[in-house]
Every structure is written in C-alpha cells, then in structure tokens.
C-alpha cells in the first residue's frame, strides 16, 4: 500500500468520526466563537487577580490532599505486596494463582478512582478518609502489577542457590527476593505518590476531602479569584512533588 | 600426596551412591543412562566430559535439582527419587553448591550472603525476621576468614571481582556446615590464575573438613592436577572412573571421541 493511499483511507475514517462526535456535543462555530470571550474573562479573573486572602484555607486543604495521597499510597504500597506475590509467575509452579492475581489486579486498575471515591463516601461519609481509601484501593492495581513484574525478573541463579541450601520458600522470599526488589518497590511507590497527589486533588471535588473539596465549592460559587489561587497552588505543589520524587528515584536506581 | 586421600577414601563412609540412575528430561531427552557410582567422605572428584555430556545433570541429580527418572540416588543415607519436600530440604542442608555464575544475592552484603547459608537450619520465624543467632554470625565470619575476604564483609556482593564473588559463594556453602560440596564449572568464568586459586581453596577445604567434593570441569589438565578421582562422561554414560594419573590416551578418546587438543587444556597453574 502506498503512503498516499494509506493517508487517504485514514482521512476517510477519521473525518466522519470527528464530525459525528462534534454533532453529538452540539459544537458549532457560533458556540465556539461565543465561548472564547467568556473563557477569557474567567481566566483573567482567576490568574490576573488570584485571591491571596484565601491562602490559609488553600494551604490547609493542600496539606490535607498531600496527606490523603501519602497515606493512601503507603497503604497501597503495603497491601500490593501480597497481590504482587500472588501474581508473579515465578514463585510457584502452578500458573493458576498468578493468573488469578493478574485478573484481580487488572480489575482493580480499570475501576475508576472517582467511582471508588463515591463508594467510600457512601460508606464512610464525606471527607479525607474516603479519599485515602479510594486512593489506596485504586493504587493497588498498578503497584501490584509492577511488583509482580519485578519479582518475575529476579535473578534465577540466586533463587536456585538458596533453594539448594535447604532454605524454605518463605526464607528465600525474605532473603533473596526481597533484598533485590525492595529498592525498586520503593521507587514504584514514590512514582505512584506523584500520581496520587493529582488524583487526591481531583477526587476531593466529589467530596473526598483535600484541595478538590474547596475547588468544587468555589467553582459552584463562581468565585474565580479564589479558584485561581487554588489552581496555581495545586499545580505548583504537583510540580514540586514530581521533581523531588524524581530526584529520590534517581538515587535509588 | 595420594596416600593420604586414598587412605581416607578406602575406609570412608559412602555419602552418595547412584544405583542404575537414569535421567530423562520432560522433553524426552535422556541425559544420564544407567549410572552406577559411589562417592565417599573426603574424596575430591572431578567430572569431565564434552559440553552436553551430562556433567551438570549428574551433579544436579545429587541435590535433586534434577529428579532421577530411573533407578535411584542415595544421598546421605536417604533415597531421593521419591523424597518428600520436607526431607529434601533437610538433606539439602548438608550439601553446599557452587555455580559458574556465583549466584549471589547481588544487592545484599557479603556477610548477608554468607548468612543465607544458615537459613536451612533456622526456624522459619527467625528466618522471616532475619534473626540469625550469635553462633550463626560467628560461623559466617569464620567462613569469610577461611576464604580470605573478611575485609569485604560489608561490601555489596556485586561490587566484588569474579574471584572474590566465587569465594563468597564458597563461604556461603561452608556456612551450611556441609558434608558434600558440589561445584558446577566453578572456575569457567575466571582467569587462569584465579581459577587455580579457587581450585586450590576447594581442594584444601575438602581435605581439612573431610568433605566429599564433586567438581565439574571442562578442562582435562585441571582435572588431572586436582582430582583424587576423575569421572569421565560421554553422552550420559560413565566411560572413565579412576585416578587422573592413570588416564591413558585411549581413555581420553573415549571421553572426548577424538585425540586430545590444546583447547581441552586451561593451562597449568602459575605456582
Ligand atoms: N532442562 C533440560 N531439558 C531438556 N534437556 C536438557 C535440560 N538440561 C540439559 N539438557 C540436555 O541434557 C544434555 C546434558 O546436559 P548437561 O548435563 O547440562 O551437560 P554438561 O553439563 O556436560 O554440558 C544436553 O544435551 C542438554 O541439552
Ligand atoms: Mg554443564
């Protein structure tokens, strides 16, 4: 197939799909044109004059988001270990546990965090604790998968060597596998913490505590200067957390 | 020289006996056919043969990394073909093993690696918590001293040279307080002087501790230099069993299916 033919075909497929999507959302040039000035006013209100008086509350809520992320990530980091062990293919001869583990982890991972947040708010009430649980459960999916893959890459030779000493499987896990994988596990957890600072901020909007909670409130109230401060502070926090965690992860490598 | 070893071997206990042992791998390939051998306390045995002759299979059958599929192997008084998991672990405790690629836990310290040799004898809860006893640590330090690398005790294992890593592996095996020491091509990754040093260490340990030591070697000259007894394998059968010095041109050709060549030699020790 020539390059040209392929481009034409792609265009033939993409164009109708795009048009169909736009029709569904009632996107018209007139609406877009009308939207620009409104967006411009809102952005000017938000970022040209953020409401610094509001800072103490923003600070308090940001810290709460960081705490939700930290506690949720920590819990997930621990709880993901049994899942990772279960899902790793190289620990037991039978492929059954590993398959069960992998299916479980995929199921957890595909379940959206925001739905978990709603579920925990229903069960635990509004607030940070629901946020912690939503973050923790969702993170197990990714961490468990990364753990399992790391365990599968453990040096076979060392495992064999300890097997020949007559060490029990538990002892081999503790003294051969764990020392090799632990630094990488810590690195995965730090990376997940980065992501969780973001999600902890977002799930607050539905009532799971933290900065998202006041973001939701101020959005409803259309208080754009306050909203501006919240957004600036959140982005700054995310950037700082990212760079610190990247530095630590580099050290661990 | 040989009067000491043969003198010991003559009345020494039999630690390993292959009885009509065969090994067929799951893919249907038969790597050992009807092997009958007895190995005794204090013997230093070298197994030679072409690549693929079954040297690794023979050695790995002793600690049942490879299960026998015909006949049986009696190891330290226990037939291992149908042994239970628990009894296998118990038997393995007294069998140290050394590998071509050292097989250390790379991110752990040298001392931690040697201590893993104690895990088999440690209660599970102690193993889980990493609570070695004082005597375990003392023994590990003694083993490190023995192989001459106590000064590296707190280095990470992967920071050591190949020769040093192999010594850590030997110390780990010694920490098991073994009666049998297996070594599968232990010097294949080392340069000749280091290789000879490791062979001398193994030989000295075998003598001093009365260990039955079984070493696989690719090189004939090394086998003749160190072995009390040479086992020649060809295509899964034993074609020579006797002192290295007695080996004739015809024996070589039975093992190697051709005349001896320079690349069957590693080069003599630089004494
Ligand atoms: N796990 C296995 N499955 C099937 N065949 C194997 C396996 N391991 C070894 N073999 C075969 O058995 C024969 C002997 O192998 P090995 O004992 O490793 O010989 P050596 O150590 O003398 O080189 C070789 O032909 C090898 O390909
Ligand atoms: Mg081999």
Image (cartoon, rainbow, N blue to C red):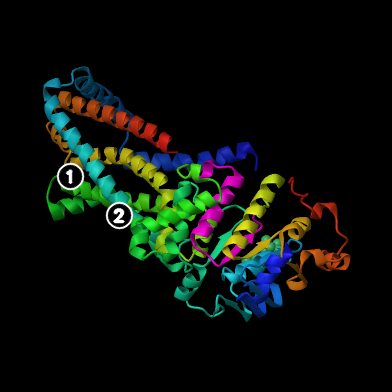
Q: Residue A183: which quarter of the image?
A: top left
What chain does mark 2 sit on? A
Q: Vertically, is B31 above or below A79?
A: below
**Can the viewer see residue A114 in this picture?**
no
Taking A119 as reference, is B75 left or right? right
Which stretch is magenta?
Answer: B157-186
Q: Residue A103: which quarter of the image?
A: bottom left
In the rendered image, which quarter contains the N terminus of chain A? top right
Q: Which residue is mark 2?
A: A79
**Can the viewer see residue B180 in this picture?**
yes
Dot 2 lies on which element?
helix
| Residue A187: percent from left, percent from top | 38, 42
Q: Vertically, is A51 above or below A94?
A: above
Magenta stretch encompasses residue B171: yes
Q: Nearer the viewer, residue A195 or B138?
A: B138
| Residue B242: percent from left, percent from top | 76, 70
Q: Which residue is mark 1?
A: A208
- Ranked by sequence position, the earlier of labels 2 and 1 is 2
Q: Please give the name of the residue rendered at 34% of the width and 31% of the height, measured from the top-left corner.
A: A244
Q: Quadrant of ligand 2?
A: bottom right
| Crowding near the residue tagged with mark 2, few <14, some 14–19, many ≥20 C-alpha atoms within 10 Å | some
| Crowding near the residue tagged with mark 1, few <14, some 14–19, many ≥20 C-alpha atoms within 10 Å | many
| Residue A234: percent from left, percent from top | 24, 30
Q: CA distance from mark 2 to mark 1?
A: 21 Å
Q: Is mark 2 within 8 Å of ligand 1?
A: no
């Amino acid at each position: 197939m020539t390059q040209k033919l392929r481009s034409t075909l792609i265009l033939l497929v993409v164009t109708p799909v795009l048009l169909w999507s736009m029709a569904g959302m009632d996107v018209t040039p007139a609406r877009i044109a009308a939207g620009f000035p409104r967006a411009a006013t809102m952005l000017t209100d938000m970022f040209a004059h953020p409401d610094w008086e509001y800072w103490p509350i923003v600070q308090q809520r940001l810290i709460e988001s960081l705490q939700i992320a930290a506690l949720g990530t920590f819990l997930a980091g621990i709880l993901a270990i049994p899942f990772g062990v279960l899902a790793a293919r190289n620990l037991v001869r039978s492929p059954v546990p590993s398959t069960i583990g992998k299916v479980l982890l995929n199921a957890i991972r595909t379940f959206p965090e925001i739905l978990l947040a709603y579920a925990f708010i229903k069960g635990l009430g509004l607030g940070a604790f629901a946020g912690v649980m939503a973050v923790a459960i969702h993170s197990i999916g990714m961490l468990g998968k990364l753990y399992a893959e790391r365990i599968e890459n453990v040096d076979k030779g060392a495992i064999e060597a300890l097997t020949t000493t007559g060490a029990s499987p538990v002892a081999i896990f503790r003294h051969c596998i764990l020392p090799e994988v632990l630094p990488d596990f810590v690195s995965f957890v730090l990376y997940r913490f980065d992501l969780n600072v973001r999600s902890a901020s977002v799930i607050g909007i539905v009532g799971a505590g933290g900065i998202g909670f006041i973001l939701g409130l101020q959005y409803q109230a259309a208080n754009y200067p306050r909203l501006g401060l919240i957004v600036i502070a959140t982005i700054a926090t995310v950037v700082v957390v990212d760079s610190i965690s990247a530095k630590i992860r580099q050290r661990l490598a | 020289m040989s009067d000491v070893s043969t003198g010991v071997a003559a009345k020494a206990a039999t630690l390993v006996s292959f009885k009509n042992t065969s090994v067929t791998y799951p893919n249907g390939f038969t790597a050992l056919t009807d092997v009958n051998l007895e190995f005794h306390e204090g013997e230093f045995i070298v197994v030679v043969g072409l690549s693929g002759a079954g040297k690794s299979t023979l050695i790995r059958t002793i600690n049942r990394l490879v299960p026998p599929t015909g006949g049986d192997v009696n190891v330290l008084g226990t037939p291992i073909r149908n042994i239970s998991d628990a009894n296998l672990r118990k038997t393995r405790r007294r069998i140290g093993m050394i590998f071509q690629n050292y097989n250390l836990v790379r991110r752990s310290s040298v001392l931690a690696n040697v201590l893993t040799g104690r895990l088999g004898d440690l209660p599970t809860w102690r193993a889980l918590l990493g609570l070695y006893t004082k005597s375990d640590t003392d023994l590990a330090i003694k083993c490190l001293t023995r192989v001459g690398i106590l000064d590296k005790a707190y280095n990470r294992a992967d920071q050591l040279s190949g020769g040093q890593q192999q010594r850590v592996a030997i110390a780990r095996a010694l920490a098991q307080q073994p009666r049998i020491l297996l070594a599968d091509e232990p010097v294949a990754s080392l340069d000749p002087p280091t290789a000879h040093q490791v062979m001398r260490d193994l030989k000295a340990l075998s003598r001093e501790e009365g260990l039955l030591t079984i070493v696989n070697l690719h090189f004939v000259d090394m086998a003749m230099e160190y072995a009390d007894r040479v086992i020649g394998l060809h295509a899964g059968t034993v074609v020579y069993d006797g002192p290295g010095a007695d080996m004739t041109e015809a024996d070589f050709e039975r093992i190697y299916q051709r005349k001896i060549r320079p690349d069957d030699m590693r080069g003599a020790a630089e004494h």
